[in-house]
Image (cartoon, grey):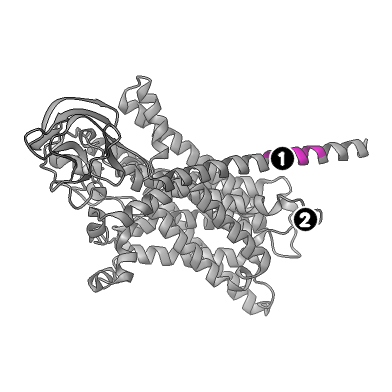
Amino acid sequence: MNGGTGYAMPVFYPDLNLYLPAFLHILGMPLGICYTVCVIVTNVLTAVISFFCIKGFLRCFRSSKGSSDAVCRDGSCGCIPASIGSFLYTLSVYRLTNVYIRDAVGEYTAMAVLPLVIYGFARIYTYTAPEKRDRFDGLKCALPLGVGMSLLAYSHVLTTMVTSALLILTALVLFKKTFTPPVFGRLALSALIFLCLSASVLVPMLDYMKSDTYLVSGSSYIMRGLYPGWRELFELIPSGSGSGIAYDLRMPTAIGAALAAVLAAYAVSAVLRLIVSLRDKKTSGSFSDSSFAGVYLFVLAGITLFVSSKYFPWTYIESKHNALSALLCSIQFSWRYIGIATVITVFLGSILIRDMMKKNRRMGICTAALLCVLAVIPALVLECRACSENPRARIGSGAEIGIVGDELYYPVSWNRDAVYDGTPQAFGGAVIESFERTGHRWTVKVSAESGEGSVAFPVVYYKGYNAVSDGLQPDTYRGDDGRVVTKIPEGFSGTIVMKFSEPFMWRISEVITLLSVILICAAMCMNGKASASGRKKVTEVAS
């Protein structure tokens, strides 16, 4: 990126999801095909993860006490709503906008794992320990949320921040349950899993953010002014367009016809249920966990849509230039909250379909089919428009590179016009006789017999670059134009090796992440063996 000048973007913007297409490209596959594979894999993962997580979520919120599940003994009230929810989520307008118009790889990868976070959080609050407990019960319960948040951190940091804020808000709303020992313990264990698995991402990023000032510090707290209204949020057919390279026209910011229908249908059904309860005077005790989950998801979807819109006081908050504005405005675009609203509404729709199928299976099936149609039509329109209006982008260098490279993570000292032509430059009394580059390691033969000098390398300065020579360690610092500069003392003649060395704490964080993965896998294997052994004993006793 930027001519191989050492841009540290992956430290700030995790790129774990890019390793598969990068590996394919190393094997000789054309870059465009590699990206297509990345998109296909992410789409498939989105569908699969959302299906199993929605199905698990519905198991967490079964029918209210005393009701019969006879009509759903075949499992259809779990599989069918989960399948419909997965379908609606995969074809949701905002997700497709991220994939095919914005080319927002980090954000649409994060959307693939958001259902895991919601399921993991619900599992912690609804989990009932079995009579015969084992030592891995707590870990199994806390694992989905911890792993889901870790995958978010490896995909898109801003989505991780927004999701964390909403989880904290929900925990506070449910404070009576949150601060009970079982639930609080599982939440704490999930947080520990998240921190350990994400240490290799979080520690370097926080270390760099603390050690220097970057362009992101000034520009990320500026909202871009692209606030959608209710028409843009709820339009049935997406009318926006635009390109992933430059938003020449307004891009689609709708949740789509299917999800808009879910919100409308749930509002109507909730009002009807309330009217019936008031008429029959059965409001006391009729509010089950499942009903509360549906109402809370509906309210949360409304809040996130409101925050994403122009009706939220973004302009006023931004004008204050205080800590609150820095925190809230760091998302840069208000419509990022639409992604959160999308996944919340999909879970709400799955609850709605399940409840309808329990009351009237045929009506539930018809509603599910209608929602699928309402999802397909906007998706087709968006796809066709994206294919016809978005030309293939060819990015060269200079001003264009900032669009793809997202210059936010350069130090403020970086000078775009500095000479980054792959050749070190000598200043003062220094004379470069020869140089060699191997990866990020520069070997330069230099002399400074006529006086003190310096060598500037065509590399952007970040913490961690240093030079060594025959046991000496010449001063390495940032030049006025943002390049790595090594001071050459007068009378010196020899070879200098300049390279990047990760700080010790980075290595420690990587070890913590690796050990955490190993320990979790080992625990799950031990649990699997114990479960298999238990089943074998039951079979022997039965026989």
- Residue 497 visible at all: yes
SS for dot 2: loop
Q: For residue 309, which quarter of the picture?
A: bottom left
Q: Mark 1 points at which residue?
A: 526
Locate residue 61 relative to residue 469 in the image: left or right: right
Residue at 56% across, 42% down: 515
Rendered position, 318 above or below 95: below
Q: Which SS type dominates the magenta stretch? A: helix
Quadrant of image for the C terminus: top right
Locate residue 525 relative to residue 264 in the image: left or right: right
The answer to whether residue 365 is magenta is: no
Q: Residue 130, which numbered label? A: 2
Rendered position, 393 above or below 27: below
Q: Where is residue 92 in the image (x, y as percent from the top left)?
A: 42, 48
Instruction: Specify which label sits upstream in the sequence, 2 or 1.
Output: 2
In the image, what residue type sits under mark 2?
A: Pro
